[in-house]
Image (cartoon, rainbow, N blue to C red):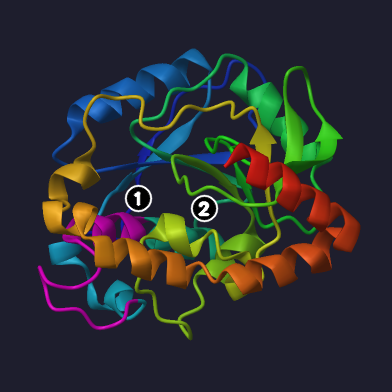
Amino acid sequence: GLMRFSPLIVSCRSECSVFSTVVINLDRDPDRLTYMRAQLQREGIPFERYPAILGAAMPQSLREYFAPQEDGTGFLSNGELGCYASHLAVYEAIADGRIAAPALVLEDDVKLPKNLTALIEQIVGAAPANWDLIRLSTPAKRAYFTVAELAPPYALVRYAISSGSNGAMLVSASGARKFIDKSDLRSAPIDQDNRQLWRFDLNLFGVAPEPIRGNSLETSTIDELTTARARDDKSRQVELRRIRKLGRRHAWNISKVGVVAWAASEVVSGIAA
């Protein structure tokens, strides 16, 4: 069934890692699974495959997360709905313990670096105890605050403006529980919603430079399922900017880093824009 995980365990080269790993993969994309398996086996990382969900075939339990939409005409395309629902289903499994936390959640088109296990264990060790999510495939395009130095060239950071990327994310149990709150219906793509840290009270961090490269394959399954209207409609872009709520972002950052650091970050971000 859609909610069943398919173990694809590879042996650990040494002691097994302190994190679990999930790869989200559509049944129709076995080549992508082969691509991910080869990389994870190279690193000696055991993983589970989660069968990704098609938006048009979403189970009712997951549809309850989303604002009502008419198929084909709603704000979210079927591809975006399926992507979002797939991540939500994985987060549900992390929240209720079916997947051990912290979990490395990977889409099936990312490029993994060598020595990934050691890096992630260092990241988890350096992160504050109350971390929720840690982005691993997000370029830091604007200002960020260094939280801890990691093995060069990496640093654990907090973003002034978090870019959207779900290619590779470390998820804690608390982060999963916060993000699966059904009281706030979803109407935007997941990479827009999980930028709104204030909305879900997410204690989010990242790694700069990003150690995992997202969208490393030539084609995107979601793009293939997303209509040209959804990608190019100017009114859609206006709505996405409205959803991101600039004022809320400013207030959130001030609460986390203080007025002086926030003001400096806005100057740097403005220059980088």
* Sequence-first disc among 1 and 2: 1
* Left-right relation of 205 to 214: right
What residue does disc 1 label? 5
Where is residue 74 shown, x and y percent of the image? 19, 73
Q: Which residue type carries mark 2? A: Ile
Q: Residue at x 54, y 59 (%)?
A: 195
Q: Is residue 255 above or below residue 262?
A: below
| Viewport quadrant of the N terminus | bottom left
Q: Which residue type carries mark 1? A: Phe
Q: Residue at x 70, y 23 (%)?
A: 118
* Left-right relation of 225 to 178: left
Task: Assess whether mark 2 and mark 1 are in contact (beta carbons under 8 angstroms).
Answer: yes
Q: Disc 1 and disc 2: Cα gap in Å? A: 9 Å
- Residue 18 seen from this side: no
Q: Residue at x 24, y 37 (%)?
A: 220
Q: Quadrant of residue 136?
A: top right
- Residue 6 seen from this side: yes
Q: Is residue 28 above or below residue 212?
A: below
Does dot 2 land on a helix, a strand or a loop?
A: loop
* Left-right relation of 51 to 252: left
Is 55 or 262 nearer to us in this picture?
262
Q: Which mark is residue 234?
A: none
Q: Is residue 74 in the magenta section?
A: yes
What residue does disc 2 label? 99
Label 2 packing within 10 angstroms: few (<14), some (14-19), many (20+): many
Q: Quadrant of residue 198?
A: bottom right
The span picked out in magenta is 66-86
Q: Is residue 139 in the magenta section?
A: no
Q: How many marks?
A: 2
Is 142 or 22 nearer to us in this picture?
142
Where is residue 107 shown, x and y percent of the image? 38, 39
| Viewport quadrant of the C terminus | top right
